[in-house]
Amino acid sequence: MTREEARKKAIELVSQMTVEEKASQLKYDSPAIERLDIPEYNWWNECLHGVARAGTATVFPQAIGLAAMFDPEFLEEIADAISTEARAKYNAYSGEEDRDIYKGLTMWSPNVNIFRDPRWGRGHETYGEDPYLTGELGKAFVKGLQGDTDHLKVAACAKHYAVHSGPEALRHSFDARCSKKDLYETYLPAFEKLVKEADVEAVMGAYNRVEGEPACAQTYLMQDVLRGKWGFEGHYVSDCWAIRDFHENHKVTANSTESAALALNTGCDVNCGCTYEYILDALREGLVTEEKITESVVRLYTTRFLLGCFEPCEYDEIGYDVVECKKHIDLAKKAADKSIVMLKNDGLLPLSKDVKTIAVIGPNANSRASLIGNYHGTASRYITILEGIQQYADANDIRVHYSEGSHLFQERVEHLAVDDDRVSEACIVAKNSDVAVVVVGLDEGLEGEEGDTGNSYASGDKETLNLPEPQLRMIEAVAATGTKVVLINVTGSAMDLAFAKNGDAFGAILQCFYPGCVGGKSVADILFGKISPSGKLPVTFYNTLEELPAFEDYSMAGRTYKYMNEAAQYPFGYGLTFGKVSVNSVVVDETALKTAMDSDAYNGCVSVKTVIKNESDIALDEVVQLYIKDLDSKLAAKNHCLCGFKRVTLNAGEEKTVEINVPTRAFMEVNENGEYVVDSKNFKLFAGVSQPDETSVSLCGVKPVEVSIAL
């Protein structure tokens, strides 16, 4: 069904509604209209990394871990599995006449905000700090969710439009201000890609203001850009109770009636909250027109017709047996395999066959919470890191000693002066083992959404890059035992790991993000060498917060790998494998590039070919990364910029030619008016398995190849 066909059907159905019935359909919990055979519908559902909050579902790695795969094609496959489970649940719940929250087909995912500051608690819901990576992954996720048949499989939603990334504690009253250059260079590209290249069906507005106007009533962003420049035809939804913030916190309106009118008149179609209960009051006071109400309801019913809600649909026969089926669990395992990033290895990994006793220590070693991140479903089975190691050990005559080692954070032990009882046990098991695997980090109770009803600790932002004090005390004690340590950090964001990076006791470091329901098995498979790690960091690990601007400052100067001034502790794009590769050539067809630039530089692309060779005797995955540096323009980012990437599987000794399409927009700069312009003729293109900076190259040991390009 085309959008035009769906819209015609929506117009016909909506024309039969009274104004009171139409107004009722603008809230997220839309009631039934029985005389028209319209069932109730709840617009609120979530599927950030699996169907969330609706009972049993496959729990994939958190979004930041999915980003670490650097694999859009596989992410699209994962999204397809998620939407299959969503349809199965919808079919089953509808059969029971259960149409409550989290049981519909409008999924409020993905989150394509830019993780510009490591303090942001919700950063692990995103695909990281780079607009190009975020756009490519977000596009793949949306396509996988929505499908490519006559009806939408589910309706995806790009959130939170558009300049939104903390602080969580201020989000209901904060005014995010940025230059037009930063807006178009950093904050908007992923949203534009999802609208124009993936036809995302919905966009969600953020809580905060942007340049003085609430994001759910931001005239320039919603009307001029989203529906104007980009031609968005789907529906716009508010973040939950964000419209109430208009009068309670932003103070841009006097009451609920004015807030409802402002949001609706600007183009917000669905209110997640209760403020649109005042739409009819706004109508009576002349603040909105019935035509405006009708316009939004037609958009919403266009979506419902596209989803096949009122007629037989090709997805109606998807049965409940697909929920958490073996195929999807296998996908979750494969995703975890690809998402884990090895930050350090002095040869300790993979563990030697001579290792016969292993100490597994730490508050996240046997924690289910550390597997799942936030906005998660409920798995019927979890494999923690301890359990994954135990399963391998049991099959290979290896003894495992376990100690929790410390509490996750101090608040849980505030009644104790210290928790040396656990630290002592950690040291004992380390001393009685050939190697210690120390599993530390955070969970959704320590980093996440402020006030989130799905998280009992209401977490919010991090105040520091340090691990919690109880964990640091435990780590220091275990490191002093003389037993070699593998440090496993399970967090959704960058932490300060300098103590392990520079400490001789730590032979290896793995960054696992939140690896999903069976993530512990993937960790074990890497520790014992069944698979080679292959994840890449989608965020920068900084040395200190002092080098960053204030959290409230939305200027990109000094932030992320593109604009930072200091060397990273661990750079964006970095990650080791158990093998060694070389990148041996990079070729750009400059004639084709010039033709593309002349015809449509904003939307074109050019093919880049590079040769990568596996120099080792094991099979492995690597991620070829292309970075561009503008050599002339004063508008250019301070550092190089990611402009292409591709995950490659290589057998032992295998060489492959890899072709990557680079957008011609990479050869343009954004001026102070937010316009993309051709402002240079000289560029350098780098091809490697990391960034081309000195820190990245020294850490990964692979020198990129480069080519000069003259337009």
Image (spheres, rainbow, N blue to C red):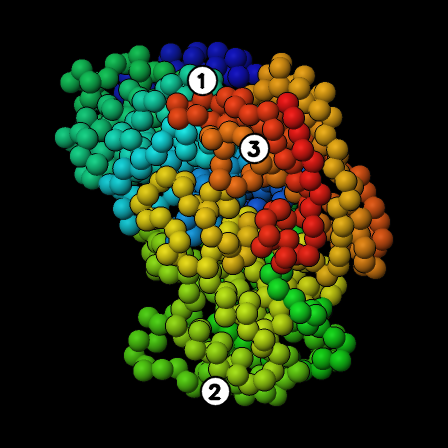
Hey, what amino acid is under mark 3? Asp
Residue 115 visible, this angle? no
Residue 701, placed above or below residue 606? below
Q: Quadrant of the C terminus?
A: top right
Which circle's residue, 3 or 1, is located before the other in the chain? 1
Q: Quadrant of residue 102?
A: top left
Q: Nearer the viewer, mark 2 or mark 3?
A: 3
Q: Secondary structure at mark 1?
A: helix
Q: CA distance from mark 2 to mark 3?
A: 55 Å
Tell which circle, 2 or 3, labels the residue nearer the N-terminal end.
Answer: 2
Which residue does the numbered mark 1 point to in the structure image? 229
Image spot of residue 164 (x, y percent): 37, 39
Q: Name the one closer to the observer, 213 or 563.
A: 563
Tags 2 and 1 in contact by the CB under 8 Å rule? Answer: no
Q: Is residue 423 visible?
A: yes
Task: Indicate the amino acid at tag 2.
Answer: Ser
Which residue is depicted at the point 61% across and 39% down?
Answer: 627
Mark 2 or mark 1: which comes first in sequence?
1
Label 3: which secondary element: strand
Residue, disc 3: 630
Residue at 74%, 26% in the rendered image:
589
Indicate left or right for 141 with 203 as reference: right
Looking at the rendered structure, the kind of residue marked 1 is Lys
Q: Residues within 10 Å of mark 3 (few under 14, many from 20)?
A: many
Q: Which residue is mark 2?
A: 424
Q: Nearer the viewer, residue 356 or 145?
A: 356
Residue 4 in the image: x percent, y percent?
Answer: 52, 13
| Residue at (48, 82) in percent of width and height | 477
Residue 437, label in figure: none
Is 78 on the left-hand or right-hand side of 252?
Answer: right
Decide which of 241, 474 is in the foreground and name it. 474
